[in-house]
Image (spheres, grey):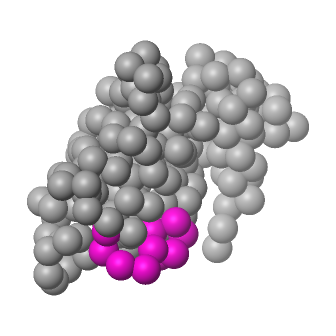
């Protein structure tokens, strides 16, 4: 059974995050925005970090849906890999606060089981095939995510634009290092 109040609280937290940034997301502010008492969030989350972890799960779900939709539209391995990188960086650049939340230091591996479960589900869903044969093992998927994360961080920081490049230019080199199509 879905806890509607908890869902309302997470959706209110997402709205605050999008409209006012990460610092605006407090248990009281979320309770107010959800039309609940200021203490209601404490019945669902032990503290702000627990609320943010639940919000991070929601964001990872959105990110994975965005990436999976784009990736599945690719016709071959290179097209899917390109779509993976492009959609990942696109999400990070258009949802900066959400992306920042997911990779915040409060959410180190192992500290939040529901977040870890969501990340594992994303890895399973993205068991994409690369330019190699067979299903990518976890190390290969983590290499893809690490590269995408680095691209996203550099794109958000404006490092590519500073050099007169778009992130798609970098993705093209990653996917086609020899310039082949």
Question: Relative to residue 5, is residue 133 drawn left or right?
Answer: left
Q: Residue furthest right?
A: 35
Q: Which residue is pictured at 23% across the width and 70% down the height?
A: 130
Of 173 and 135, nearer the camera is: 173
Quarter of the image where one finds residue 23 = top right
Instruction: From the top left corner, tell me how far across and down residue 48 is, in percent.
Output: 53, 28
Of 136 and 179, nearer the camera is: 179
Q: From what the image shows, is residue 144 above or below residue 29?
A: below
Dominant SS in magenta = helix
Q: Is residue 155 visible?
A: yes
Q: Quadrant of the N terminus?
A: bottom right
Q: Residue furthest bottom?
A: 134
Instruction: From the top left corner, tell me how far across and down residue 118 is, in percent.
Output: 40, 59
* Count of numbered badges drawn on the protein: 0
Q: Is residue 101 visible?
A: no
Question: Relative to residue 57, is residue 179 drawn left or right?
Answer: left
Q: Which residue is pictured at 26% across the width and 75% down the height?
A: 129
Instruction: From the top left corner, tell me how far across and down residue 9 is, in percent.
Output: 70, 43
Q: Which residue is pictured at 60% across the width and 45% down the height?
A: 44
Q: Quadrant of the C terminus?
A: bottom left
Point out the stretch of residues depicted in magenta: 69-78
Q: From what the image shows, is residue 111 above or below residue 58?
A: above
Of 171 and 4, nearer the camera is: 171
Q: From what the image shows, is residue 18 above or below residue 64?
A: above
Q: Which residue is pictured at 34% across the width and 51% down the height?
A: 172
Instruction: From the top left corner, tell me how far across and down residue 8 is, in percent.
Output: 75, 49
Q: Is residue 76 magenta?
A: yes
Q: Is residue 173 magenta?
A: no
């Amino acid at each position: 059974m879905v806890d509607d109040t908890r869902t309302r609280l997470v959706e209110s937290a997402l709205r605050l995050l999008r409209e006012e940034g990460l610092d605006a997301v407090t248990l009281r502010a979320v309770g107010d925005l959800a039309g609940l008492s200021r203490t209601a969030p404490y019945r669902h989350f032990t503290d702000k970090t627990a609320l943010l972890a639940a919000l991070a799960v929601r964001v990872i779900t959105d990110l994975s849906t965005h990436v999976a939709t784009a990736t599945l539209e690719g016709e071959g391995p290179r097209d899917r890999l390109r779509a993976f990188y492009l959609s990942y960086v696109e999400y990070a650049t258009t949802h900066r606060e959400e992306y920042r939340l997911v990779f915040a230091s409060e959410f180190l591996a192992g500290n939040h089981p529901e977040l870890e479960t969501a990340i594992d589900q994303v890895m399973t869903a993205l068991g994409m095939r690369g330019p190699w044969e067979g299903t990518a093992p976890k190390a290969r998927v983590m290499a893809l995510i690490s590269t995408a994360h680095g691209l996203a961080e550099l794109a958000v920081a404006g490092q590519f634009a500073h050099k007169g490049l778009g992130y798609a230019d970098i993705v093209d080199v990653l996917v086609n290092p020899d310039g082949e199509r």
